[in-house]
């Protein structure tokens, strides 16, 4: 893994710092029920954490200095550095629980495509929760971290947990799933992101694309993913490819019709299954091997249908500390 977990001996003048890595995700299945009174949709989803990850580094600042957010990495454009950033809110929530002032420098290194349906912002929030808990000595339990995560966003609890899990409720109630083997993905990204809320609104207007109406949908149920879960447990990659499913795909395709070409090119390149990831616009194409994933990516680039290509594998771990230095406190 190359993870480098160490705690340096206290030395004078060195501010405490902690770095946490948290994964992006692909929804192997995403089933969406009719919108509820609170504006949210009941979901049944199967998440897989993948090797595109965010790294969040928290460093203590002088008393009274407050929170400062900085963003680095290949895709940092358009990421807010003010209070609307979920990592900022995560640090605030933990500081409040710990009863201390949030005097913290937050550095976000973005490895997950921004606004792409892979929960990069949620991964930042999950990482910031774990990092702030450590840096501010909040001593939060797993359950408390999970509760704060669910407050920050529907996908944040999965960023804490990682691996593969079935999500219900808003996607925040998680049950880990047993899986065998690794999946290899080609991920095609688009420069212009899609708004999750707008994709859900389009789903409400147009339904899942099979002719049924969004308002009259049968309640979603985890049994609908029996084949997928069976294939994951058996390490049957072709079976996983056949069972990939996304109820939001038709809505994402309506808002970004070009995505149809991304799916078609992946199919021509022999993908085992291609879907829009979450609310899109990233397309995830399941490959037979890392080499096949690179070939699918090359086909996308050659066809000029994507703005960026990533190759990733999963499952991978949830938010975890990869480096920490204690202060001389
Ligand atoms: O929970 P989060 O803030 O990540 O959700 C972003 C938006 O996605 C919500 O404002 C809502 O419009 C939509 N959403 C939904 N049903 C869910 C999860 C998200 O309608 N289960």
Image: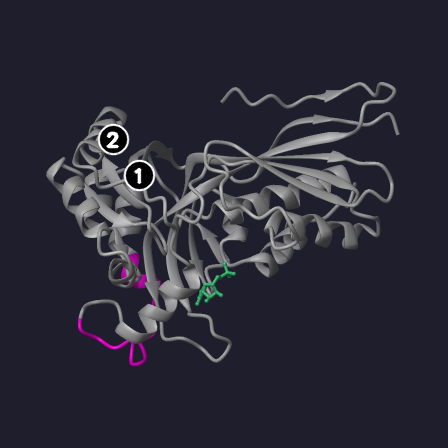
Are the residues at dot 1 and dot 2 in contact (C-beta closer than 8 Å)?
no
Crowd around label 1: few <14 · some 14–19 · many ≥20 (10 Å): few
Q: Earlier in the sequence, mark 1 or mark 2?
A: 2
The answer to whether residue 174 is above or below residue 3 is: below
The answer to whether residue 258 is above or below residue 5 is: below
Q: Quadrant of the C terminus?
A: top right
Q: Is mark 2 on a helix, strand or loop?
A: helix
- Left of 75 or right of it: where is 132? right
Crowd around label 2: few <14 · some 14–19 · many ≥20 (10 Å): many
In reply to whether residue 10 is colored magenta, the answer given is no
* Residue at the (23%, 33%) spot, across then down: 301
Foreground tag (1 vs 2): 1
Residue 316 in view:
no
* Distance (Cα) linking label 1 and label 2: 16 Å
Tell which of 81 and 173 is nearer to you. 81
Q: Mark 1 points at which residue?
A: 307
Question: How far across and how far down the image is residue 300, in percent?
Answer: 21, 36
* Residue at the (54%, 58%) spot, across then down: 153
Question: How far across and how far down the image is residue 147, in percent?
Answer: 63, 58
Residue 227 in view:
yes
The mark found on residue 293 in the picture is 2
Magenta residues, start to end = 211-225
**What colour-coding does the image apply?**
one colour
Q: What is the quadrant of residue 178 in the picture?
A: top left
Q: What element carries label 1?
A: loop
- Left of 240 or right of it: where is 32? right
Q: Main secondary structure of the magenta part?
A: loop
Question: How far across and how far down the image is residue 75, in percent?
Answer: 46, 37
């Amino acid at each position: 893994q190359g993870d480098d977990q160490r705690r340096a001996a206290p030395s004078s003048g060195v501010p405490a710092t902690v770095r946490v890595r948290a994964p992006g995700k692909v929804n192997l299945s995403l089933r969406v029920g009719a919108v509820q009174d609170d504006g949210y949709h009941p979901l049944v989803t199967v998440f897989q954490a993948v090797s595109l990850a965010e790294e969040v580094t928290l460093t203590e600042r002088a008393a009274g200095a407050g929170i400062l957010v900085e963003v680095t990495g290949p895709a940092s454009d358009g990421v807010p550095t003010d209070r609307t950033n979920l990592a900022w809110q995560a640090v605030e929530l933990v500081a409040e629980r710990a009863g201390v002032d949030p005097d913290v420098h937050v550095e976000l290194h973005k490895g997950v495509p921004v606004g792409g349906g892979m929960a990069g912002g949620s991964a930042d929030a999950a990482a910031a929760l774990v990092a702030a808990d450590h840096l501010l000595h909040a001593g939060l339990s797993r359950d408390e971290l999970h509760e704060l995560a669910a407050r920050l966003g529907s996908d944040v609890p999965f960023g804490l947990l990682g691996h593969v899990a079935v999500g219900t409720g808003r996607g925040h109630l998680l049950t880990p799933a047993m899986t065998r083997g690794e999946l290899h993905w080609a991920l095609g990204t688009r420069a212009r992101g899609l708004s999750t809320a707008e994709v859900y609104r389009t789903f409400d207007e147009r339904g899942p694309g099979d002719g049924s109406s969004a308002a009259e949908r049968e309640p979603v149920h985890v049994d609908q993913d029996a084949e997928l879960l069976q294939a994951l447990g058996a390490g049957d990659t072709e079976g996983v490819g056949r069972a990939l499913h996304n109820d939001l795909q038709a809505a994402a395709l309506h808002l970004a019709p070009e995505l149809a070409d991304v799916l078609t090119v992946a199919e021509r390149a022999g993908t085992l299954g291609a879907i829009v990831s979450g609310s899109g616009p990233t397309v995830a194409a399941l490959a037979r091997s890392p080499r096949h994933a690179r070939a699918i990516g090359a086909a996308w680039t050659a066809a000029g249908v994507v703005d960026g290509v990533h190759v990733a594998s999963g499952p991978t771990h949830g938010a975890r500390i990869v480096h920490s230095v204690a202060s001389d406190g």
